[in-house]
């Protein structure tokens, strides 16, 4: 499965609704953010490895100010894990794939 891109417009459907079926990890990022760029390939690999078990999503905070504000994104990269429509974990900074898998696995 590939990393999906979400926006303010489709966040409800692709993240909140989907999280009732499986965990959804959302990476709040910006294209100019160096650590965010380093996280990209890690998330691609994670999405590939998790397959259908979890959704890995990215939201560009520069283009989607409503959700960035709603979830109080103060620094990036910032990831939030959604389960049953709620944020169950918050992960800040650059993390490796093993750490991210460990966090998601708690909610499978």
Image (tube, rainbow, N blue to C red):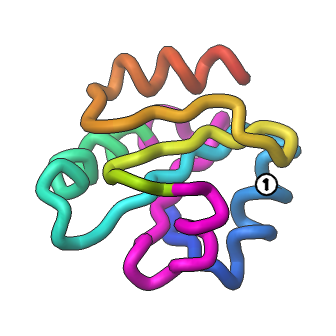
Looking at the image, is 22 positioned above or below residue 7? Answer: above
In the displayed structure, does residue 43 sit left or right of residue 4? left
Looking at the image, is 61 positioned above or below residue 98? Answer: below
Of all residues, the one furthest to the left in this rendering is 34
The quarter of the picture where the C terminus appears is: top right
**Residue drawn at (33%, 49%) of the image:** 77
In the displayed structure, does residue 41 sit left or right of residue 46? left
The reply to whether residue 1 is visible in this rendering is: no
Q: Nearer the viewer, residue 62 or 27?
A: 62
Residue 42 locus on image (x, y percent): 28, 40
Q: Which residues are magenta?
A: 47-72
**Label 1, on which residue?**
18
Looking at the image, is 52 positioned above or below residue 27? Answer: above
Residue 27 locus on image (x, y percent): 45, 52
In the displayed structure, does residue 26 sit left or right of residue 13? left
**Residue drawn at (44%, 58%) of the image:** 28
């Amino acid at each position: 499965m590939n990393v999906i891109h979400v926006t303010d417009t489709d966040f409800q459907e692709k993240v909140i609704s989907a999280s009732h079926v499986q965990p959804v990890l959302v990476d709040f990022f910006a294209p100019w953010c160096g650590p965010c760029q380093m996280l990209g390939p890690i998330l691609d690999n994670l999405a590939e490895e998790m397959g259908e078990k979890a959704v890995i999503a990215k939201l560009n905070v520069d283009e989607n100010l409503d959700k960035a504000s709603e979830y109080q994104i103060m620094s990036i990269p910032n990831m939030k894990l959604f389960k049953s429509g709620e944020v169950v974990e918050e992960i800040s900074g650059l993390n490796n794939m093993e750490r991210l898998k460990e966090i998601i696995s708690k909610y499978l």
